[in-house]
Amino acid sequence: MRRPLMLLATLALAAVACEKKSAPAPTEPQPGGQAAGAPSTPTPADANTILLGEVGSLTGPEATFGISARNGIELALNEANAAGGVKGKKLAVRVYDSQGRPEEGAQAVTRLITQDKVVLILGEAASSVSMAMAEKAQVAKVPMITPTSTSPEVTKKGDYIFRVCFIDPFQGLVMAKFAKEHLKLSSVAVLRDNKSAFSMGLADVFNQKFTEFGGKIVGDESYSKGDTDFRAQLTAIKQLKPEAVFVPGYYTDVGIIARQAREVGLRVPLLGGDGWDSDKLYELGGSALEGSYFANHYSPDNPDPVLQQFLAKYKQAYGSVPDSVGVLAYDAARVAIEAMKRAPDLSGPALRDAIAATKDFPGISGRITIDANRDAVKEAVVLKVSGGKAEFVTTVKP
């Protein structure tokens, strides 16, 4: 099957932000995410270029997230280069494919640090992959910013690891509170992915908070990433007669789960987190998703002029409205760029301190402040699936 993106590239980013680039010829990935035919020791950037690293799932089940992140980062660097770059130098990024696998992400980070000599790393989306990457970045003292890894464990890997998204405890709180107070639910069942740190963490927090709010968790079923038949778990849940089912998984599983839930006669709303956010969700789930709700980082329906201007630029460049990963990757890159401008030099410690000092940054996904745990303090939105798309319902602030 033809791959949609080049897996290893140093992207020339001096073009204006709205220019749409044509992708280089696709290549087959080798272990560690390196492109076939690529040199074993890529040449470091020249003296006039600041090289960043990026790791994302460009192939595999969650490829839409990696592609969105790549686009958002590219757009941010295009804008920075058009405005003169950083410290008189242009910015470039070297991209590796994690394939959505922790071991591939860790290998990619090792290459970025030891061979490519990057000053900073952007990525990944999935918490499990980010944790494997963070261990390598922390030891090497190379700052890493993840756009959307929400597990609290990610930034606990060390003081060089940051994020620009809210974390699972907040996301779990948002959905538990929404279920109890907005939807007036008394009983909810849970269906979680036991191979995903994201899914497990979010389910744990939701269960705790929903119970604290006076609700009851009537059942807690699980599946493993890669499963395609969820009917046994859904049938067991149906027998418990919940008023909704919390499914904190990724869109690739949720779409199928929604269809199979309707097949077994389970017709209550499904609830979820930001892992649902992809246009592919509606292709996979179709009408079975109608009336379901999920937490997310932003809504394209927000009339904020800065957001709408960004959406227009993204759509012109890439032909679509970005998901939350694309928006947060853009914000992550911009936070990194501003930190590089403020830092006295581009050493790891200097960049770490500059990123940590980020306060009230005007992100597209909302204003971002990095707290003492290197997590972002920011708002969340709740969206409803209606008419084959996600509609804004409410905003929840920290």
Image: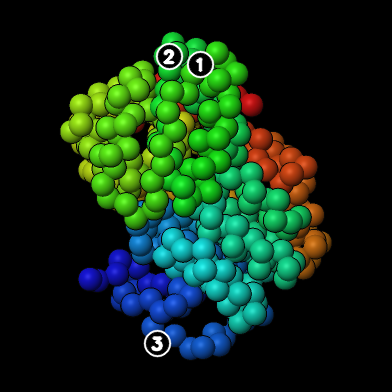
Task: Return the residue at label 3.
Answer: 37
Which residue occupies 41% across, 72% down?
7
Q: Nearer the viewer, residue 224 or 329?
A: 224
Q: Vertical placement of 17 versus 277: above or below?
A: below
Residue 293 in view (yes/no)? no
Task: Rate crowding at label 3 as few (under 14), some (14 to 19) or many (20 or more) other CA atoms within 10 Å.
Answer: few
Q: Relative to 342, is 316 on the left or the right?
A: left
Task: Return the residue at label 2.
Answer: 185
Q: Vertical placement of 354 versus 364: above or below?
A: below
First in residue order: circle 1 vs circle 2: 2
Q: Quadrant of the N terminus?
A: bottom left
Q: Relative to 70, is 127 on the left or the right?
A: right
x and y, in percent, of residue 299 in the image = 43, 32
Amino acid type of the residue tagged 1 in the rendering: Gly
Q: Which mark is residue 310?
A: none
Q: Nearer the viewer, residue 201 or 21?
A: 201
Which residue occupies 57% across, 32% down?
205
In this rendering, the label closer to the viewer, 1 or 2 = 1
Amino acid type of the residue tagged 2 in the rendering: Leu
